[in-house]
Amino acid sequence: MTDVVVVGGGQAAASLVAKLRSKGFEGTITLIGEEPVPPYQRPPLSKAYLMGEMEEERLYLRPAAYYAENAIDLHVGEKVIAVDRDNKEVMAGGRAVKYDELVLCTGSVPRRLPGSIGGALDGVYVVRTLADVDAMCPSCVSGKRVLVVGGGYIGLEAAAVCAKLGLTVTLVEAAERILQRVAAPETSAWFRDLHKGHGVDLREGTGLVRLLGDGHVTGAELADGTTIEVDMVIVGVGIAPASELAEACGLEVLNGIAVDSHGRTSDPSIWAAGDCASFPHGEGRIRLESVGNAIDMGELVAENIMGAAKAYVPKPWFWSDQYDVKLQIAGLNTGYDRVVVRKDGDALSHWYYEDGRLLAVDAMNDPKAYMVGKRLIEGGKTADPEAVADPETQLKALLKA
């Protein structure tokens, strides 16, 4: 009988163990998560959960009873501190757990402000875990002043929730524009206007020099020479792959735990999936931070543990909810040289091209554009840019062109 041990408590881990059982895997499955709750979804943390619109149990990917009912030995609140590759065991909860196949679904960790800037002060938060959001919720009340550091999707989502809750919001982004790393200037400009329209004091090209306060944060000195008073700070400056465990046991790490096209690491008995894993893509490697990647990669590794020998072909998709806007993204825009804007009433989408080939679509409250773009990209097809820009063009007709 094969013993599978999975390390992690997020989407990749939950998808993997469920896939093993649904495909008829008869060996033992042990799932070890560091957090004291069953695997849960993270995207609602900075949105519905922070708003108080979602109960904790609704975050759970499966009811707690599911694991016992499917013979999955779930251990929560236990940190795996070491992997012994020679003896094929992991150390967690003061004991050794044997494995035949080990899967690392360790996810990612938020980047924090260094102590020299004031990151050690009370009232400074990140948005990654249930505990992170539970800690900041009591401070997110109307009338409070919050500084959001970082103009990526996490920072913008946190700013939107805080503004809706009645806080006075200042957001600073050190780069020249928000979303600079992930989106075109057209998308950045649209979201800039959206946040300013909701009263957010959005400052681009402005970094944080240091936080002020004695024990608890009370203010911030900004690179534009101003000082503002704040009651709390939310840091959204990106995440890094949680690869420390892999590094410590000698696995190859290349911007994440390096795996082959099947999800296997440099040790043939160890696999990785989700945010923590970098995999072959084109002529290089890529690491995707998304729910879709976590699900697809976790399920692929489950099948490959059972001998499927399938190569991973990513189908990137992402989303972000801000105020009453749902942004849906299909594809990867890396290398784009043209952006085509399509406006159809209140629906808006930005289509990314490279040498005439469709790469990605940003769709703002435009689910039809998202679905059509996604189908085109996944099918290796493109769409004529002029037809896309013409609001008279029926989107479904692009699929037949």
Image: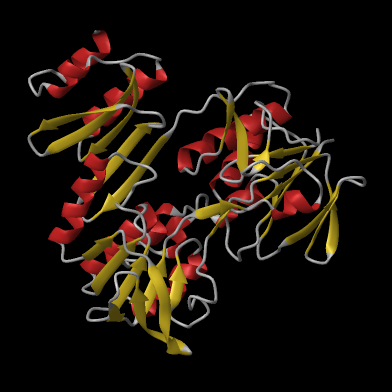
Q: Which residue is pictured at 83% across the width and 44% down the height?
A: 99
Q: Nearer the viewer, residue 58 or 98?
A: 98
The quarter of the image holding the C terminus is top left
Residue extending farthest to the right is: 87
Q: Residue 138: x and y, percent?
A: 37, 80
Please count the marks in the image.
0
| Residue 53 in sight in this render | no
Q: In this view, does 250 lie to the left or right of 38?
A: right
Q: Which of 54 and 170 is in front in this view?
A: 170
Check the image and report above or below for 371 versus 255. above
The quarter of the image holding the N terminus is top right
Residue extending farthest to the front is: 225
Q: Residue 137: x and y, percent?
A: 38, 74
Q: Residue 269: x and y, percent?
A: 81, 36
Q: Which residue is pictured at 32% across the width and 75% down the height?
A: 140
Q: Which residue is pictured at 25% across the width and 8% down the height?
A: 400
| Residue 121 in sight in this render | yes
What sort of colour scheme is used for the picture? Answer: secondary structure
Check the image and report above or below for 144 versus 180. below
Q: Is residue 249 left or right of residue 68?
A: right
Q: Residue 259: x and y, percent?
A: 68, 34
